[in-house]
Image (tube, helix red, strand yellow):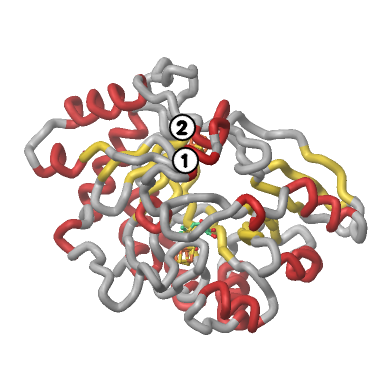
Amino acid sequence: MNERLADTRNRPLRDLRLSVTDRCNFRCTYCMPREVFGADFRFLPREELLTFEEITRLAGIFAGLGVEKIRLTGGEPLLRRNLPTLVAMLAAVPGIRDLTLTTNGSLLAAQAGALRAAGLHRVTVSLDSLDDDVFAAMNDVGFPVARVLAGIEAARAAGFRPLKINMVVKRGVNEDSILPMARQFRGADFALRFIEYMDVGNTNGWRMNDVVPAAEIIARIAAEMPLETVPQSYRGEVARRYRHVAGGGEIGVISSVTEPFCGDCTRARVSSEGRLYTCLFATDGTDLRALLRGGAGDRAIAEAITRVWRGRGDRYSELRSANTTALPKVEMSRIGG
Ligand code: SAM
Ligand code: SF4
Ligand code: SF4
């Protein structure tokens, strides 16, 4: 393992987010608004996606460069056929200590057991409200809360505990869901994370006024349920964590807009067609698929990744301003958050 690989701001490469598909069965207004991702939108044809063998080979190369954590994401990763097969392949990659998945939960009830058996360590389910009308308006396909809750229950029964729940909070849209969510997912089986609505991609029409600051979210919860802070457990942990003083369980806030954490950002992202991005807000990626399919050896691919990481200076959230939010950026649904 190359312990010394660090970028221009001395940040090591530790985490890899792998997007396994650019498709999704939801049209969350903050991620894939249907005005853009409508019936005519052209998703990637199958042959453009990295195969399971290509993904696993890349994972091994990244592990050799210091990556210990892999998160599978999308689009909606459970739409990728035979995902448990990929999970089993990745679970066998030496050096990967943590293999996780972020999903909208819609297809989880049917797949939780197979994912667990294949060696997946942890699951995060995104859920923005317990109110069907609010949730339907946000996922914009009328998807009911109960089916996501069934997926959450299946994951819990399969042994994914504690289960992480992600909620993106948008001012005037689902802020009234903060307290009901905190009540529902209290207790040792869950870790609820509130995410500030971010200006990812170019399509969601983001405005600062739509952001509910993390400090406000915590104050609202603490007014009803006393909280105490939990110290950061490792460098690069993005959530600021709190524990319920009574009853157990944890909540966290991801304050990427109001309190950016670029200084600790140790994540690389690979899109489903094999482009490497070093920031969620990147404008361009590096084509690793061309190397994989062009006959490059592992060493040459590792060198290409090393060059990109050594040259990395990203700190978009720290520099966020009227000018940066207007720059063209990769869409979240391509690189998976
Ligand atoms: N489809 C899966 C899901 O929704 O969990 C995985 C991919 S999704 C892009 C990953 C995470 O990014 C989700 O938790 C989602 O809520 C979050 N996300 C998407 N757009 C966002 C935005 N504009 N601001 C903050 N979080 C966002
Ligand atoms: Fe799909 Fe996840 Fe984006 Fe929602 S946040 S549109 S579920 S990829
Ligand atoms: Fe990392 Fe870029 Fe987010 Fe900063 S803005 S934390 S560098 S992904």
Q: Residue at x 64, y 57 (%)?
A: 210
**Residue 321 appears in which quarter of the rendering?**
top right
In the image, what residue type sits under mark 1?
A: Lys
Q: Position of residue 150 (x, y in %)?
A: 59, 79
Indicate the secondary structure of the residue bearing disc 2. Answer: loop
Q: Which residue is mark 1?
A: 69
Q: Residue at x 34, y 63 (%)?
A: 83
- Which is more N-terminal, label 2 or label 1? 2
Circle 2 crowding by C-alpha within 10 Å: few under 14, some 14–19, many from 20: many
- The answer to whether mark 2 is within 8 Å of ligand 3 is no
Residue 328 spot, x, y in % from top left? 37, 45
**Residue 116 visible in the displayed image:** no
Q: Is residue 103 visible?
A: yes
186 shown above or below 12:
below
Which quadrant: the N terminus?
A: top left
Mark 2: amino acid: Arg
Dividing the picture into quadrants, the one containing residue 326 is top left
Residue 305 circle label? none
Q: Is residue 229 above or below residue 312?
A: below
Marks 1 & 2, CB-CB < 8 Å contact: yes
Is label 1's Cβ within 8 Å of ligand 3? no
Disc 1 and disc 2: Cα gap in Å?
Answer: 7 Å
- Nearer-the-camera pick, 187 or 307: 307
Relative to 219, say whether 97 is above or below.
above
- Locate residue 330, reporting x and y percent: 36, 48
**Which residue occupies the extreme front position in the image?**
322
What residue appears at the point 21 percent right and 39 percent down from the top-left corner?
A: 288
Residue receiving disc 2: 14
Figure label count: 2
Q: Residue at x 59, y 63 (%)?
A: 159
Secondary structure of the residue carrying tag 1 is: strand
64 vs 103, left or right, is left
